[in-house]
Amino acid sequence: MAGDAGEGKTVLVTGASGGIGQALAAAFGSRGRRVALHYHSNGAGALAAAEKVWRRGGAAEIFQADLSKEEDVERLFSQVEAALGPVQTLVNNAGIAWQGLLTDMTLEQWRRVLDVNLTSAFLCCRRALGPMIRAKDGCIINISSIWGQAGASCEAAYSASKAGLIGLTQALAQEEGPSGIRVNAIAPGLIDTPMNSRLSPEALAAFTQDTPLMKMGSPEDVAQAAVYLSEAAFVTGQVLGVNGGYVMN
């Protein structure tokens, strides 16, 4: 990718301890970004993400927070701003899954999935937007899913939360465009991550068989898309499918 449009700017990646989060860290770090890496409980994973940046001579720090709590989000952003400067790119990547029949799901389980996957993005977007609006510049990237576009059996809460991220993305793109802020989403398909390692070999084979490119994606595929969206000056309100053709719009 030519040029370093974001060099020297700060990017905050939530949920940076997982496979996609670590790939995001490495990709943005390689572009000269100052990378703030959030984690909730997996500090070792976040440290591994930071090390991917440090090995390339980049700047990265890790920060702990429960993003479902308003006070934690405020503390996170204040710490990032003090350490690395204002957040010019926010990547809402934090997420969890729950599999099972909707009739077996408790209200507590439903709320937890929505809190982690959608409410956290709302809180982070709301906190990030003030400085972005004042600067008349900023970029938000929400990591959704193909199941936010098509829905998945036995993943109702996950699908609802990821669909909500798409709605949030397009509403904010309209709302914040006049302030020079771009808001986009990425909808990954089957990606080779620990979250998908729970799938049986038979399920993985069936999924790849139904994917036109006949393979799983990598975390790096998602990270490359995020870097593109962070630098694409005339792209906003879009949902970029990184799914091997499984869902086509």
Image (spheres, rainbow, N blue to C red):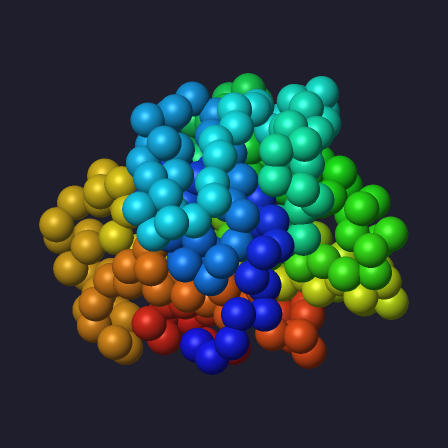
Query: Quick one: which residue is furthest to the left in this view?
Result: 201
Depicted 60 relative to depicted 173: above or below: above
Taking the spot 15% from the left edge, 59% from the top edge, the residue there is 205
Depicted 165 relative to depicted 97: above or below: below
Taking the spot 67% from the left edge, 32% from the top edge, the residue there is 82
Q: Is residue 123 left or right of residue 37?
A: right
Task: Give x and y (percent) for residue 172.
Answer: 76, 57
Q: Is residue 154 visible?
A: no
Query: Quick one: which residue is furthest to the front in this view?
Result: 57
Q: Is residue 19 left or right of residue 69?
A: left
Between 239 and 233, the one nearer to me in the picture = 233
Residue 198 image-quadrant placement: top left
Taking the spot 72% from the left edge, 58% from the top edge, the residue there is 138
Depicted 34 relative to depicted 167: above or below: above
Task: Give x and y (percent) for residue 44.
Answer: 33, 26
Task: Give x and y (percent) for residue 134.
Answer: 87, 52
Task: Give x and y (percent) for residue 197.
Answer: 22, 42
Taking the spot 35% from the left edge, 64% from the top edge, the residue there is 221
Q: Is residue 44 left or right of residue 76?
A: left
Q: Is residue 48 visible?
A: yes
Where, quadrant-wise, is the N terminus in this rendering?
A: bottom left
Between 229 and 202, the one nearer to me in the picture = 229
Between 80 and 197, the one nearer to me in the picture = 80
Total number of numbered labels? 0
Residue 50 image-quadrant placement: top left
